[in-house]
Image (spheres, rainbow, N blue to C red):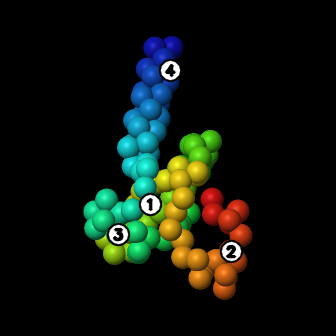
Amino acid sequence: MEVFFYSVIGLAVLYGLILFGIVWKTQKKCECTHCRTAMHLERTNRPLYVRRFYDYLPLKFFRCRRCQRTFYLHKDTPDSEPESMKETAPKPKASYT
Ligand SMILES: [Zn+2]
């Protein structure tokens, strides 16, 4: 019974730590913190573990094409997806997970 108790505590701590890591990577601005650019960012799918365990977080996932760093933005934070792309290729927003 004790083993069960400690594994539940362990999992809860792990879950909290990963959640903290995600919040830590969430930015207020759509900008790469490493190369200070807002030009080379692309929206991409969230990692599988985020989709599975943290799906309730209202986050968008971005990757910098220059340095490959990733970060999150709150759903309501405006991003800098180019206007021209929106006109020529109207991608349904729901396709991003
Ligand atoms: Zn970058």
Q: CA distance from mark 2 to mark 3?
A: 23 Å
Query: Mark on residue 37?
Result: 3
Q: Is mark 3 within 8 Å of ligand 1?
A: yes
Residue drawn 42% across and 51% down?
Answer: 27
User: Is 65 left, or right, of 84 in this rendering?
Assistant: left
**What's under tag 4, amino acid-wise?**
Phe
Q: Which residue sits furthest top?
A: 1
Q: CA distance from mark 2 to mark 4?
A: 47 Å
Badge nearest the viewer, 2 or 4: 2
Could you tell me residue 49's position as x and y percent? 53, 50
Q: CA distance from mark 4 to mark 3?
A: 47 Å
**Quarter occupied by residue 97:** bottom right
Name the secondary structure under disc 3.
loop
**What's under tag 1, amino acid-wise?**
Cys
Q: Residues within 10 Å of mark 3 (few under 14, many from 20)?
A: few
Badge nearest the viewer, 1 or 4: 1
Q: Residues within 10 Å of mark 2 (few under 14, many from 20)?
A: few
Query: Mark on residue 30?
Result: 1
Name the secondary structure under disc 2.
loop
